[in-house]
Amino acid sequence: MLDPNIIRANPELIEKTLKRRGWQADVRRLQALHEQYRRTLQSVEKSRAEIKERSKTKTAEANLKILRADKMQLKKKEKTLERLKIELEAALKELPNLLKDDVPDGRGESDNIVLRTVGEPPRFSFSAKDYLTIAAKHDLIDLERAAKVSGSRFYYLKNEAALLSLALVHYGLDIAISEGFAPVLPPVLIGEEAMSGMGYLEHGEDKEIYHLPKDNLYLVGTSEQSIGPMHMGEIIDGARLPLRYVAFSTCFRREAGSYGKDTKGILRVHQFDKLEMFSITTPEQSEQEHEYLLSLQEKFVKGLGLPYRVVKLCAGDLGGPSARTYDIETWIPSQGRYRETHSTSTTTDFQSRRLHIRYRQTGGSAALVHMLNGTMAAVNRPLIAILECGQRADGTVDLPPVLQPYLFGKTRIG
């Protein structure tokens, strides 16, 4: 959520952000609502002070009647103030985060900027296979039985694919823990306050979320949704920052907006396992932290020996809470293109303001923290790249050396 004071001080900045993102909102109406709330708050505070002062002295019966009337009037003002507060917060929640200055203009994926490309796509001297063909040969993925059990976009990972999945998680954990990240196994069901606080119930993003209405709980679509609210309502000692977590969880997405996209296979599914990095920093630390998270993601992909590129997302391709996002896209030979395998975003104080997470500064005052997230391993996608990039003419698949310690000595599939 944005700082309400920006609405009064710089509404043009919000309008510029909305225009660059391609969003719609009535900023002038919001400005008027904020001004009404501000004036009502001043009136309430003035009335409270006057009543408190009058209550200190003994008064005649006539004055007591006036005091009682003033208290009744104050209650009416307080009700109006509460109504305006709710309206203002609801309107603020419809606004996205402000953009970092270096975010490029653009409407969608085609306008994203490639920052660098690392490694060369493999050149095969034979007719290369897609990962589903490879998986069928070695009994690695079972889509048909999963469809019988759960429906479309579900799957069973079997044999070496199951081992590879776990190996990717262990490999990512080793990288993060060696850097001082604290490992966490978070809940996969979270309450409405937590999910809303992370900014995932507005702007149509709730269509991607599984909701259990009887319990009013939500299944997480990424570990960050349960890690972010972990410090909800807290004031953290500034000397402890940055706080860094690496969380593993099964994640769930409805994929409501992806009809007709990647319908076959395990690239876009309803359930998948994910290892996620999450950082809580001071505002001064957050810029460096964002680059740091990206460097760890690159270390992960480089270690696997996979060709990739780093992309900076344009304004129109960013999620609402994000002020800036980098993606890593890894080469998928059967598709002849790079596909997203990693993402890292800074949300500045957008989420911490909603979640009321602050830190104690040196001078003793409290200020909002900044929050950042970054994929370490959304397991299915690097798994696909490993199967396709590592294939050989005889149908076997070479396994990355960095994963072999987690694979019981296996060096290849087949």
Image (cartoon, rainbow, N blue to C red):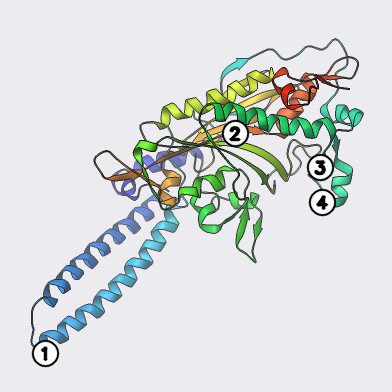
- Against 211, residue 282 (above or below) is above
**Mark 4 residue type:** Ser
Disc on res. 375? 2
- Against 250, residue 201 (above or below) is below
Which element carries disc 3, helix, strand or loop? loop
* Mark 4, residue position: 150
Q: What is the spatial separation of the Cα atoms under label 4 and label 2, in whole angstroms?
A: 26 Å
Q: Badge 3 local density, few (<14 within 10 Å), some, or many (20+)?
A: many
Disc on res. 323? none
**Does residue 312 appear in the picture of this structure?**
no
Q: What is the spatial separation of the Cα atoms under label 3 and label 2, in whole angstroms?
A: 22 Å
Q: Mark 3 or mark 1: name the one nearer the start of the chain.
A: 1
Q: Mark 4 or mark 2: name the one nearer the start of the chain.
A: 4
Q: Badge 1 local density, few (<14 within 10 Å), some, or many (20+)?
A: few
Task: Report x, y in % for residue 123.
Answer: 78, 11
* Mark 3, residue position: 155
Q: Badge 4 local density, few (<14 within 10 Å), some, or many (20+)?
A: few
